Amino acid sequence: MTVAPEADEELQAAFDATIARHDRIEPRDWMPEAYRKTVIRQVAQHAHSEIIGMQPEGSWITRAPSLRRKAILLAKVQDEAGHGLYLYSACETLGISRLELTEMLISGRQKYSSIFNYPALSYADVGTIGWLVDGAAICNQVPLCRTSYGPYGRSMIRICKEESFHQRQGYELLATMMRGTDEQRAMVQESVDRFWWPALMMFGPPDDDSPNTAQSMAWGIKRNTNDDLRQRMVDMTVPQAEALGVTLPDPDLRWNEERQSYDFGSPDWDEFKDVIKGNGPCNAQRIAHRRRAHEDGAWVREAATAFAERGIA
Amino acid sequence: MTGIQGDWPLYEVFVRGKRGLNHVHVGSLHAADDEMAVRHARDVYTRRNEGVSIWVVRSDAITASSPDEKDPLFAPSGDKVYRHPTFYDIPDDVPHM
């Protein structure tokens, strides 16, 4: 069916009015093609990040130092899988299939958060990832609960409820290590030194170098700019670091009385771009692992399909 | 909205949070058959005691109204204010009404 130009304008006006009311767009509503594409890109990238995000910490499950820590880590990694599934489910309401999404991830055509291309080298990293990486994710995700695309917002509400456990278990893990030996304290500091800057990069490039931000905010998909959220993260984290007894590796970090906020240095944006381009420490490994898991699971999917078909007959 | 060949069917998931409440739509998932859909729904949507009962139904079995708010489907209720209790003037001194 071809839509007359005036009808198209009417649909656009109805869409704009919904956005202007801060109301939600729902799956079967008319939406501009560019809006649909932008939401698919953002939600898919978010879903892929949850799925790839299982890997750095997942490698520590078998080496967790106690049954308590192992059970916690297992539950956390399982949550990341769940978050990926909520988001894939939201993304599919826009008319893209799960298989397409999986294939775009393992062929490298869609991205995931650059943070997961860094390795988890020590057990302290499990704590630091919970504290800083999930902390940054929470900063990013809380405003997304009000994003304009309904299914995305509803996924974010579920995810935010669960992320709080992730951050707290990480902080508690680090606090426990900080009450331990000098060697354990050094492990925590070394881990924080490695993760601080990549965690700040999670909010994306600075506002003056973020071409999609303005349109995404106009559509209500994003609610805050990258730099706003980064500032919020720094302001929240500094007192937590003090309570923990670790130093954040930024010589320019200091309280600004006038702004009632912390001034801080600039992440290495060349490194950020390089990691996004595929040259991070673990890019190839992460995708290879995801691809292998998908391919190794093929026989299970085939068997279940065959079983289901037999049931119908 | 059909997926590439190889995707399992899509199911919509409804969870009853506790006794006395309705089942509420919580999201969707893929499964090879109904039984697997219930198991996956448990793993994906009720990891923290969010439910006491799960319904799953294949998405392609759902018939929905048109999403357009101006749809004449809802128009008949628009001008019937007398269906609401606030339509009626009752003196303030009449109790229990």
Image (spheres, coloured by chain):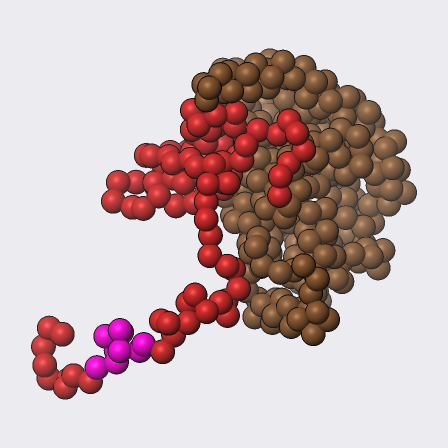
Chain colours: A brown, B red
Q: Is residue B87 magenta?
A: yes
Residue A125 occupies quadrant: top right
Q: Is residue A97 magenta?
A: no
Residue A79 occupies quadrant: top right
Q: Quadrant of the C terminus of chain B?
A: bottom left
Is residue A185 visible from the viewing direction of this image? Answer: no
In this rendered view, identify the residue nearer to me: A127 or A72: A72
Q: Is residue A40 above or below residue A14?
A: above
**Residue at 48% over, 25% down:** B33
Q: Residue A113 in the image: state x and y as whole percent.
A: 73, 39
Q: Is residue A225 above or below residue A238?
A: below
Q: Is residue A71 left or right of residue A271?
A: left
Q: Is residue B22 above or below residue A83?
A: below
Q: Residue A297 in the image: state x and y as whole percent.
A: 64, 17
Q: Residue A102 in the image: state x and y as whole percent.
A: 69, 31
Residue range highlighted in magenta: B80-88
**Residue at 57% over, 14% down:** A303
Q: Does the magenta stretch mainly form a helix, a strand or a loop?
A: helix
Q: Quadrant of the N terminus of chain B?
A: top right
Q: Is residue A73 left or right of residue A45?
A: left
